[in-house]
Image (cartoon, rainbow, N blue to C red):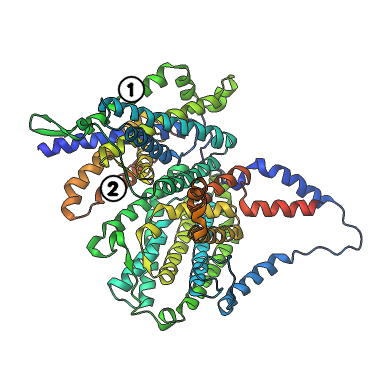
Amino acid sequence: MSTFIAITVSALALGAVYFLVASGLSLIYGLMDVLNFAHGVFLTLGAYAGWAVASRLVAPANPVMAFALSACAAVGCGAAMAAVTELLLIRPLYGRPVSQMLVTIGLDLAMVGLLFGIFGSNSRSIPVPPWLTSVTRIGPERIPNGDFLALGSGAVVLAALAWFLRSTRYGIIIRAGAENRQMVSALGINVGSAFTVVFTIGGAAAGLAGLLNSVVFNGALIDPSQGDQLLIFAFIVVVIGGLGSLAGSAIAAVLVALVQVYVSFYAGSGAGLAQLGNGSVVLFLAVVLLLRPRGLLGRTA
Amino acid sequence: MTRVARQPQPASAEPRATARLTDRLAAAITRPRPPGAPVPRNRTRWTLPALALVIAVVLPLASLQIPWILPGPVDVLNSAGTLTVLGLCFVFAGLALGFDLLFGFTGLLSLGQVLYFATGVYVLDIALADWHWALLPAVGFTIAVGFILAVVLGAVSLKARGIAFAMVTLAFAQAGYYLIEDNPHSLTGGDTGLVMSTSRLPALLAGVVSTRNLYWLALAFLVAAYALVWLATESATGHVWLAIRESERRTEVLGITPFGFKLASFVISSLIAVAGGMVYLLLIGTAAPGSVASTTVTISVLVMVVLGGVGTRWGAVAGALIYVYLQQYLLKVAAEPSFGGLPGFLRVPLSQPNFLLGAIFVLLVLFAPGGIAGLASRVRLRRAAD
């Protein structure tokens, strides 16, 4: 029983990381019809930015503060990369969603190649505060503190995004643009700047997700292809949740993580099939699509 | 309230780039021909490919030394290394053709074509190395497995449309990759891969001169794939595919159910990939998940097709030949000792073929959306208009 609660918390934490990646993908697709393959690069660059900051601060006086700084660097780096991508590569191709997607595929190929050139295929290790690597006892349970960090970050970002979309001017433009882009432009509103905002927000969340993913789930190690591995699960989450739906992404992120973790813990490790959990996620996707081709909360065409 | 369907448009169907070209074409057609001038005949349409094919067929017999140009470890034209690289070019050219049938001619962007390539490689490998079957039954079994897989997974994936279809196919391919990595019953060799067994192969494909024969086999695969794609796209079915690409809804209104046609395109494309996988295994002799089953392979094939020009048969072939050749050649250049003397900011990016290919791809999508075929037709139209 106690392992059940521990792995459930761990699954929810994984779901929180999936949500951080999928929310940006889903918002970008909802507003612009662009499937952003470069999201994997935003993830990886965020993790490397966090590593660069954390490893420069040798023996910091306040390790928690140092980690907060590296998280800020990850968010900033992801956001900056996303904004530059939107302005330089996506903007010249407005109205051509397939070309936009192809450009992000090329960017992903080039950037992962460049990162392999710079860092090689050896993993880098991010220095983390000691609190993160220990566990908290709640009654008989031993929960890794990293899980709480991921869960907390996911919840904060979900709340912040919901508030942003509901209550700010840009949020309203983004929601209206996802409904009917031509109408929003016809009302004299600059949808182009909303595109940049959506990309920047998605990149910021992805940068944070990249850092959290390596700190919480990969033993604080990063390598250049890590973002692309996470991206595939984020794609599955976005399709199951329904393209363009933030709430759908949140629900699907949790469901996918639960399926993945439960199957790999209860069925996979017994049968010696380490990847069974990953495979079951694909099966879950196929079932959802057969029952609801537009995903859980997807728009109807 | 009706909503505009969010269907992806193939890159070639984008009107902006072609608007000026149609003006030029109209000018070229309407210009009166001087009296007595011979009617121009499009003879180059057949002579150039035929010439290329003849050169490709006799190439293994020519022992020429061409320094610098060839990517193999030895600069001799018919050395085993060079022939293997060229055979690899042909295999990927066939794959690119199959991918273009689906993406360029039917408008379906599948990101899971590597699954069928990996099926060809791994099922044949397992039948030969694990079960010690003879070549012919192993090939037949591989094709049967690939066919059933393509029909079942194609029917499920085609429930989704547009971008969702791309992601579902991507997910299925990823599941195949996990299965291979997991090494069930020690069949696939997991991460380390599975070396092919040559014990039951005919001497023609396993002997000392086998590289030359395997080169011809790869060439034959490419020619067969080209003929199949050519026949299929020029047939009545091919016209329905084009109609589906342009507007699926309009095709439905005309009384045609797109599902069966889309599935047919999917299955043909997948079977070409299965055949390509089998040729790959015979040529390279080993199956490793990273190089035959990972999504990187699908992405490279997509890059090849866009590089050559979406929806053009020869463009896909040209794109694949250039891509594979460049990749091998850049690796060779990066291994040169003189290359190590370059400053870091030049050496690091230039030593990564994927960086250069990705950068070239981005520039092509931004500035030459029609790929090589688009550039060629632009030049041809300009010449016709002058």
Q: Which residue lies furthest to the right in this view?
A: B35
**In this rendering, position of residue A95 left or right of residue B204:** right
Is residue A259 visible to us here?
Answer: yes
What residue do we see at 88% from left, 62% from top? B37
Q: How far from the left and from the top, in percent, is residue B156? A: 38, 50
Q: How far from the left and from the top, in percent, is residue A86? A: 52, 33
Q: Residue A42 carries which label?
A: none
Q: Which mark is residue A278?
A: 2
The chain containing the residue under callout 2 comes to A
What residue do we see at 24% from left, 60% from top? B184
What residue do we see at 54% from left, 36% from top? A90
What residue do we see at 32% from left, 47% from top? A282
Q: Which mark is residue A159?
A: 1
> What's the amino acid at mark 1?
Ala
The chain containing the residue under callout 1 comes to A
**In this rendering, position of residue A19 left or right of residue A267:** right
Q: Which residue lies furthest to the front in this view?
A: B341
Quick one: SS at disc 1? helix
Tell which of A166 and A76 is nearer to you: A76
**In this rendering, position of residue B16 left or right of residue B205:** right
